[in-house]
Amino acid sequence: MQQGSETTDLGQALSVLRRRLPLILLCVVLGAGAAYAYSKHEVKKYVATASVVYNYNSLSQQIAGLSAGSLSSSSLLAQQASNLELARGGDTAAKTARIVGHGLTAVRVATSVSVVAQGESSILDITATSTSPMLAAEIANTYARQFVHAQQGANRRYLKSALAIVEEQLAALTKEQRVGNDGLQLQNRAQTLSLLSRLNYGNVQVGQEAFPPASPASPKVTRDTGLGLLLGLVLGLAFAFSLERLDRTIRRPEDLERLYRLPALGAVPKSRAFARKARSKKHRRTPLPPADAEAFALIRAHLRFFAINQRLRTIIVASAAPGEGKSTIARHLAEAEARSGARVLLLEVDLRHPTLAQQLDIQPGPGLADVLIGAIPKDEATQTVTLEASGGGGAERTLDVLTAGAVLPPNPGELLESHAMADLLARAQTTYDLVILDTPPSTVVSDALPLLSKVDGVVVVGWVGRSRRDAAERFHDVLASSGASLLGVIGNGSTVATPGDYSSAQGDGPTSPAAASMNGASSREKLVVTTKG
């Protein structure tokens, strides 16, 4: 079960990526393009690095009065931190600005120079950043030299101070003490301090001067473009999945199954060819090709398979919202059943916006409304559509159609809930093998809701890519509380490839591509319309 769930999740993710691919590609292109444009127009910056080295040798320790030896790791880190503070502080930036010129200030030098240590070593790197490679190298070298000069000056002052103290100690000794051990040590230290002060000795010096860089450190056009592309991809994926979560449109036939908790009876794919035919009245009598008619034959077969334990005499074809193709599917399902030799009545109970008369190109009335008010018998209002196979081959089949009527009543809900409607359904079941009811959208009007529990089964139609999840969820709640026998769902307008490349029933009204045909026979047919009575 877990493996199947993971496969389903992966399939859904890939489906989201396919649907949102244009958005993802747009984000990738915009991200890479914006990064490239910004990088190309960004001011070039050059980086140059000079280094200074501290000498922690035995001579400097002896001068300080310490025993000769190497510094411990902790002492070296502490000394390194102290050196970094010295290099970053003071008036070195101001001195560098005055010497270099070019309109530099102490603040600009301080912000353009960074001082870091090389690991746990006694080397400090002084890095300068500028829009000119020559200026970057000059700033780094000048800063390093000024820092070394300042440290050497401080060191000279220290040596002079130390020499003055030693000489003062020597002056306090007697002649006998001066030739003694302590006196000789003080004399040696005085000589060393005097020599070092004259040699300008210091424990820090420039280790390596900076050279003008050959290429800018920033911007890196290739790197920045790659980062922009990656960022665009991440944002595109985030937008794609966010929109998918916010999108309440039913995208796949499997979504209908999951929302209604019903098995799929079939999927009717889209067809652009019939969409073009539907716009012309002269094409309205064009029959469906064999492969397209087979889609409805398969739905009929699946319907019988799912209802194998019960006899279906009355079926409602319903949808949650208008424009989902239920009238067209009801019509072609009725034709498929009639072609099998069954006696079928296609009953239009949408008394608000009827479409079957226009689809079939028959008289709109009198119809169901006239029958329910007793103005005309059912047999006189029923029209018979005769299906003849072209070439004279095959037996002649007929389909009875009872349209809503030419004059629409002001109280359709009351008429459909009346005893007259119940009697009509009862009589129709004794006359026909199957009665298919084309109902109004159930979440828009409640006219047909009383009929849900009076029929043998309900087929739900949803338009993949157009139907809304919230409408389907509301209709599911209505169906669950109605006590109706639910048979399954039909996904209309599906983009999923199916065997035979079936054409789509594209709507409830006369603009339906499937409705553009006068019948769904698998062979060329023509319609002969008669009226009973």
Image: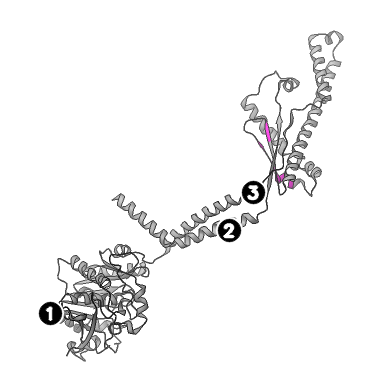
Q: Is residue 62 above or below residue 85?
A: above
Q: Position of residue 79 (x, y in %)?
A: 67, 30
Q: Earlier in the sequence, mark 2 or mark 1?
A: 2
Q: Residue at x 34, y 72 (%)?
A: 271
The label number, if any, that marks residue 218 in the structure image: 3
**Amino acid type shown at disc 3:** Ser
**Amino acid type shown at disc 1:** Thr
Tell me if 107 is positioned left or right of 197 in this view: left
Q: Position of residue 72 (x, y in %)?
A: 63, 24
Q: Is residue 63 above or below residue 125?
A: above
Q: Residue at x 19, y 76 (%)?
A: 339
Give SS at disc 2.
helix
In this rendering, the count of numbered labels is 3
Which span is picked out in magenta?
Answer: 108-124
Give SS at disc 1.
helix
Front position among marks 1 and 3: 3
Task: Report if the CB atoms under discs 2 and 3 are less than 8 Å apart.
Answer: no
Q: Residue at x 69, y 33 (%)?
A: 82
Q: Image quadrant of residue 295? A: bottom left
Residue 483 visible here: no
Q: Earlier in the sequence, mark 1 or mark 3?
A: 3
**Amino acid type shown at disc 2:** Ala
Q: Which residue bears the numbered disc 2?
A: 34
Q: Is residue 430 above or below residue 298?
A: below
Q: Residue at x 29, y 63 (%)?
A: 257
Q: Earlier in the sequence, mark 2 or mark 3?
A: 2
The label number, if any, that marks residue 430 in the structure image: 1
Tell me if 8 is positioned left or right of 48 in this view: left
The label number, if any, that marks residue 422 in the structure image: none
Give SS at disc 3.
loop
Picture quarter with the C terminus: bottom left
